[in-house]
Image (tube, rainbow, N blue to C red):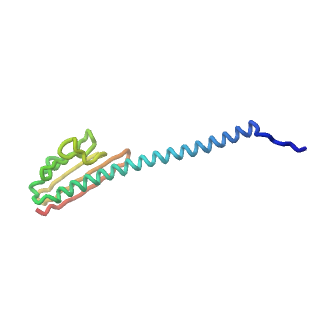
Amino acid sequence: MNKKFHGVTLIELLVVMAILGIVLSVIIALYFAGVRSYISTENRITAQQSARFAMEYIVREIRSVNDSTKIEVRDDKTIVVDGKRFYYSPNKKSLCLDDDSHEIANYIEDFQVSYDQSKKIIKITIISKEGSDTYSLTSTLSLRR
């Protein structure tokens, strides 16, 4: 007997749809895991770059000053360099220049400055945080004059 098949049975169709559903579920789960990982990495990189930029900017300003008397540490969160005031704004989680409208770094968790005037050493620490990742930068500068 020679039977010719003209289609698929309902059971075959259901099995194929179930397999496709499982494969698509795995693909979609992997895609969204990749997107979440990408976004997390981007945010972490942005926080690190922001802290690095702020540190480089402040250090450059300090090094450009010819007279150490033009550097003033007002408290452990504020430093004035040649009339430019750098300070930490906790409500914005940012490092600001002169006033709140000039943010030079975001994602900042903490900013600390100490100045040993007898040794002419400034220590700056910037801690940035994005999610559960914390990134800390410390720079110690010896003033020449």
Q: Residue at x 20, y 47 (%)?
A: 97
* Residue at x 35% of width, y 46% of height: 130
The residue that appears at 30% across and 50% down in the rendered structure is 50
Q: Residue at x 26, y 38 (%)?
A: 91
The N terminus appears in which quarter of the rendering?
top right
Q: Position of residue 17 (x, y in %)?
A: 67, 39
The residue closer to the viewer here, 24 or 5, is: 5
Please give left or right for residue 121 compared with residue 54 in the image: left
Is residue 133 found left or right of 72 in the rendered image? Answer: right
As drawn, the residue found furthest toward the right would be 1
Pick the quarter of the image with the C terminus: bottom left
Is residue 123 at all visible to an observer of this figure?
Answer: yes
Q: Position of residue 41 (x, y in %)?
A: 41, 50
Q: Is residue 76 visible?
A: no
Q: Is residue 81 left or right of residue 137?
A: left
> How many labels were placed on the picture?
0
Q: Quadrant of residue 12?
A: top right
Residue 115 image offset from top left, x and y in percent? 15, 54
Residue closest to the far top:
10
Q: Quadrant of residue 13?
A: top right
| Image: 132 above or below 139 | above
Q: Whole-percent x and y of residue 29?
A: 54, 44
Farthest bottom residue? 144
